[in-house]
């Protein structure tokens, strides 16, 4: 499911290929976060009728900076977007932050073209505090530098 979500995320003008997210790779990404001092929690959401997983979210908070919670990943498979699953996932995150963590800031991010996530983040009263610019340089171009 994570692989499907990541491969369907808006890429803006980037040209990178498909992601391959095996369970081993996902586990190693979690382990890397733990080595950096990050703690993880998250949720998955499934269709009630079929129990098919259709979305997930993962959150990081660092033991050295407990004021900050970072929404690392939230996504819903394409055919189920716009049905409230992403909002439900983020409400669960917010509930846990308010009840179990003493964080002062909840950071998240999304592509400028991701209208579903922008709508959710506005509903949750997130404010734009910065923009990250990502540059892409293809290998054949940077080999000439």
Image (cartoon, rainbow, N blue to C red):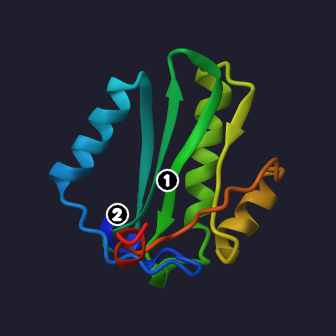
Instruction: Say which of 20 and 59 sits in front.
Output: 20
Judge the density around disc 2: few (<14), some (14-19), many (≥20) Cα neighbours within 10 Å.
many
Q: Residue at x 44, y 78 (%)?
A: 8
Instruction: Point out the residue furthest to the top here.
Output: 64
List x then y, in percent, for residue 133.
66, 61
Residue reaching furthest left? 24
Q: Is residue 48 above or below residue 33?
A: below
Earlier along the polypeptide chain: callout 2 or callout 1? 2
Q: In the displayed structure, would residue 126 be above or below residue 34?
A: below
**Residue 125 got which mark?**
none
Residue 124, percent across and down?
A: 77, 52
Image mark for residue 73: 1
Percent coordinates x, y for residue 53 in the rendering: 34, 65
Q: Position of residue 72 (x, y in %)?
A: 51, 47
Near mark 1 (Cα within 10 A), the count class, few <14, some 14-19 or many ≥20, is some
Residue depicted at 59% across the width and 75% down the height: 83
The residue carrying mark 2 is 2
Q: Report whether residue 112 is seen.
A: yes
The residue depicted at 44 percent of the width and 47 percent of the height is 43
């Amino acid at each position: 499911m994570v692989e499907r979500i990541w491969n369907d995320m808006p890429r803006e003008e980037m040209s990178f290929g498909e992601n391959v997210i095996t369970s081993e790779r996902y586990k190693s990404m979690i382990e890397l976060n733990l080595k950096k001092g990050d703690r993880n929690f998250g949720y998955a959401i499934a269709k009630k009728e079929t129990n098919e997983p259709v979305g997930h979210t993962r959150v990081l908070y660092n033991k050295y900076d407990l004021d900050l919670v970072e929404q690392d990943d939230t996504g819903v498979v394409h055919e189920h977007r716009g049905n409230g699953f992403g909002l439900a996932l983020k409400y669960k995150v917010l509930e846990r932050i308010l009840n179990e963590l003493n964080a002062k800031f909840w950071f998240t991010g999304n592509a400028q073209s991701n209208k579903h996530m922008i709508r959710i983040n506005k509903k949750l009263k997130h404010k734009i505090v910065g923009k990250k610019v990502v540059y892409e340089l293809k290998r054949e171009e940077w080999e000439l530098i």
